[in-house]
Image: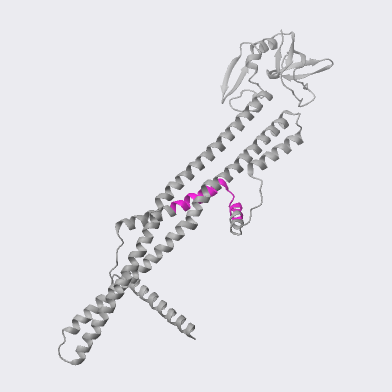
């Protein structure tokens, strides 16, 4: 029974405090009550904390979008995180593209130029996918996690203490208002000198003033103590900025590593394609013919006229042109494997030697090739004429 009485008294006291705060807050909004202003330093700290929270949230959310563009995947990861379970491993977009390229290249045939190129590109895309996965893991650990810890940990504590400070300020201002009203009533009562009842009123209001002054001292002490606690917490924002700066540097280094890896992977791929395939398969920029022109022919045949486009060298060998204008035949070494597209063309194997000659009316990018009993058109850019 005593416990119930205590709980009822506490409930009543809490209700009275809440009502007093609500009245004070309302009167402040209506301009009918004075408001204790926080000191400028504390206001600046509160503003700095709020600004830090807002921008940290924006940076964190946009970084998550950057690292994982798929919103459904982000929601799934969020749910698993809240359930304190590890999200299942998921193939990312570069890895998926790489697998499709490898499968397509295998289907078309690794021995064909296109199939081989697809496989090489697919392997590079999968390496980029692995680098992308490492970037996400490193960024989540070294950048996103500290930002999230601030929002969900430090700032929640700051917000809690800030709300408590607001309540203590309302209590203080409510106490100031009650004391002001009590003193005004006491002054009015002291001006009445007629009856004994008025003297009783003076004593009552004097007691009320004393009680209000004591309450004001208590609320002022509680407000000052809470303001100091809040100030100490807010001054830690500078340390938070310093910590986030280190995390930002880690994020930049992770991105730098990722882009350097991707650049190196693509550079290696470009070199592989440049060695193994004609340049017309690598670039369609500024090409005047539909026949492949490998850059290595710049040194394979004499006095080429050279045009450079995006790092790809296109050659037009003069001795091959001389051959086309003559009626004779020459021996030529095959530079690259070539699969005949139809029955009018001759399939070639790298490093084999064939006989080539020109035929009147044939396209300028082709010669007639002969190997034993086999004969057919061959692209001039796959050949190196022999003396």
Is the C terminus in the top left, top right, bottom left or bottom right quadrant? top right
Give left or right: position of 169 versus 110.
left
**Above or below, comparing residue 96 to residue 47 in the picture:** above
In the picture as drawn, the residue positioned furthest to the front comes out as 2
**Above or below, comparing residue 321 to residue 84 in the picture:** above
Q: Residue at x 31, y 56 (%)?
A: 41
- Viewer-closest of 55 and 18: 18
In the picture as drawn, the residue positioned furthest to the right comes out as 373
Magenta span includes 63: yes
Residue 274, percent from left and from top: 65, 25
Q: Which residue is drawn at 31% across and 73% down?
A: 174
- Viewer-closest of 314 and 62: 62
Residues drawn in magenta: 54-76
Q: How many marks?
A: 0
Residue 134, percent from left and from top: 60, 42
Give left or right: position of 148 versus 364.
left
**Above or below, comparing residue 242 to residue 233 in the picture:** above
The image quadrant of residue 164 is bottom left
- Viewer-closest of 108 and 126: 126
The image quadrant of residue 129 is top right
Predominant SS of the magenta segment: helix
Q: Which residue is drawn at 44% across and 54% down?
A: 54
- Viewer-closest of 32 and 170: 170
């Amino acid at each position: 029974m005593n416990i119930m009485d205590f709980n009822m008294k506490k409930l009543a006291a809490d209700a009275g405090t809440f009502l007093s705060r609500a009245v004070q807050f309302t009167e402040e909004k209506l301009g009918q009550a004075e408001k204790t202003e926080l000191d400028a330093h504390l206001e600046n700290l509160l503003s700095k904390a709020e600004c830090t929270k807002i921008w940290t949230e924006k940076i964190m959310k946009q970084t998550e979008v950057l690292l994982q563009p798929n919103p459904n995947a982000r929601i799934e990861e969020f749910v698993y995180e809240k359930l304190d379970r590890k999200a299942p491993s998921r193939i990312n977009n570069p890895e998926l593209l790489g697998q499709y390229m490898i499968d397509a290249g295998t289907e078309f045939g690794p021995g064909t130029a296109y199939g081989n190129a697809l496989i090489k590109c697919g392997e590079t895309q999968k390496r980029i996918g692995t680098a992308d996965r490492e970037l996400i893991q490193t960024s989540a650990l070294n950048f996103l996690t500290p930002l999230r810890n601030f929002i969900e940990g430090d700032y929640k504590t700051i917000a809690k203490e800030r709300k408590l400070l607001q309540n203590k300020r309302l209590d203080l201002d409510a106490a100031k208002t009650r004391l002001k009203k009590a003193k005004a009533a006491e002054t009015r009562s002291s001006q009445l000198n007629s009856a004994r009842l008025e003297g009783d009123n003076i004593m009552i209001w004097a007691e009320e003033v004393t009680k209000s002054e004591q309450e004001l001292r208590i609320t002022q002490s509680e407000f000052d103590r809470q303001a100091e606690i809040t100030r100490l917490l807010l001054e830690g924002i500078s340390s938070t900025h310093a910590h986030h700066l280190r995390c930002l540097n880690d994020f930049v280094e992770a991105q730098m590593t990722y882009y350097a890896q991707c650049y190196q992977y693509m550079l290696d791929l470009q070199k592989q394609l440049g060695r193994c395939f004609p340049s017309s398969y690598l670039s369609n920029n500024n090409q005047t013919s539909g026949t492949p022109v490998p850059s290595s022919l710049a040194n394979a045949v004499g006095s080429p006229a050279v045009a450079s486009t995006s790092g790809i060298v296109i050659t037009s060998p003069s001795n091959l042109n001389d051959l086309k204008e003559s009626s004779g035949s020459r021996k030529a070494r095959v530079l690259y494997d070539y699969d005949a597209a139809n029955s009018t063309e001759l399939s070639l194997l790298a490093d084999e030697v064939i006989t080539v000659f020109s035929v009147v009316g044939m396209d300028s990018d082709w010669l007639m090739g002969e190997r034993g009993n086999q004969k057919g058109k061959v692209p001039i850019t796959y050949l190196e004429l022999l003396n």
